Image (cartoon, rainbow, N blue to C red):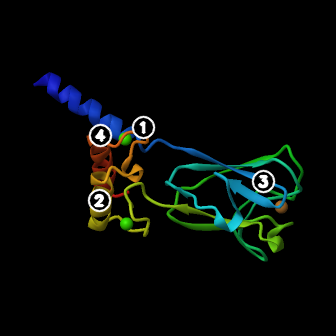
Amino acid sequence: MKMRLAVLAAVWSLGASALAQVEHVVELVGTTFVYNGQTNEDIDITIHPGDTVRWVWVSGFHNVVSGSPGNFDGLFRSGDPENPPAEFVVTFDDIGDFLYHCHVHGGLGMISMIKVRCPADHNVDMDVNTLDVLAFLNDWVAGDDAADFNNDGVVNTLDVLAFLNAWTSGC
Ligand SMILES: [Ca+2]
Ligand SMILES: [Ca+2]
Ligand SMILES: [Cu+2]
């Protein structure tokens, strides 16, 4: 019995480890933000509360400013525009859509967005409810990569445990 509990605890902690903080790197190249081969407004990046985004200057004279061009919302700003090498890191704790731009090139479309969602918000609509369980199980049954909740490259029962663990915690 003790053994069984130990195994259960181990599986549970595997699930919890899926919630570890992750760093996402966005590069500043020429007049574009680049992430995963996507640029500026075409970047599709969804992160979790507590994750960080690291902006890395590769080429060009830039800064990183929250809000849309001409409408600084005061959430974050890297400082005055500068040349590489430079980096800027922000930790996102709140759920939401966070628009940002480069003050120098915002008019040229150097604008992008970070979406912050709870890990259990599987359908990315900012609510965690039973629809997310249905959406997750749908992907899980289909063996879809989106159901690889613990990011280990395999879709199996550990992902269900990890998902339900996150879902029960409410975020
Ligand atoms: Ca949802
Ligand atoms: Ca997995
Ligand atoms: Cu720029």
Q: CA–CA distance between discs 2 and 4?
A: 16 Å
Q: Residue furthest bottom?
A: 70
**Tag shown at residue 138:** 2
Residue at (89, 50) in percent of width and height: 83
How far apart marks 4 and 1 lie (CA) works out to 10 Å
For label 1, the residue is 152
Q: Is mark 4 within 8 Å of ligand 2?
A: yes
Disc 3 C-beta below 8 A from ligand 3: yes
Left/right placement of residue 157 relative to residue 144 reads left
Q: Which residue is mark 4?
A: 158
Q: Are marks 4 and 1 in contact (CB under 8 Å)?
A: yes
Give the crowd class for mark 2: few <14, some 14-19, many >=20 residues within 10 Å.
few
Q: Secondary structure at mark 4?
A: helix
Element type at mark 1: loop
Picture coordinates of residue 157, whole percent (x, y): 26, 42
- Which mark sits nearer the N-terminus, 2 or 4? 2
Q: Position of residue 31 (x, y in %)?
A: 83, 61
Going from the N terminus, do you reach mark 4 or mark 3 first?
A: 3
Badge 3 is on which residue? 28
Q: Amino acid at mark 2?
A: Asn
Seen at 57% across and 55% down, the residue is 92
Task: Identify residue type, mark 4.
Answer: Leu
Query: In the shown orientation, is residue 131 left or right of residue 109?
Result: left
Q: Would you say the residues marked 1 and 3 are in contact, meaning their CB atoms lie under 8 Å apart? A: no
| Disc 2 from disc 1: Cα separation | 19 Å
In the picture, the disc for residue 78 is none
Gap in angstroms between the C-alphas marked 4 and 3? 37 Å
For disc 4, the neighbor class at 10 Å (few under 14, some 14 to 19, many from 20) is: some
Q: Amino acid at mark 1?
A: Asp
Left or right: residue 161 compared with residue 71 = left
> Mark 1 vs ligand 2: CB under 8 Å?
yes
Label 1 near label 2: C-beta < 8 Å? no
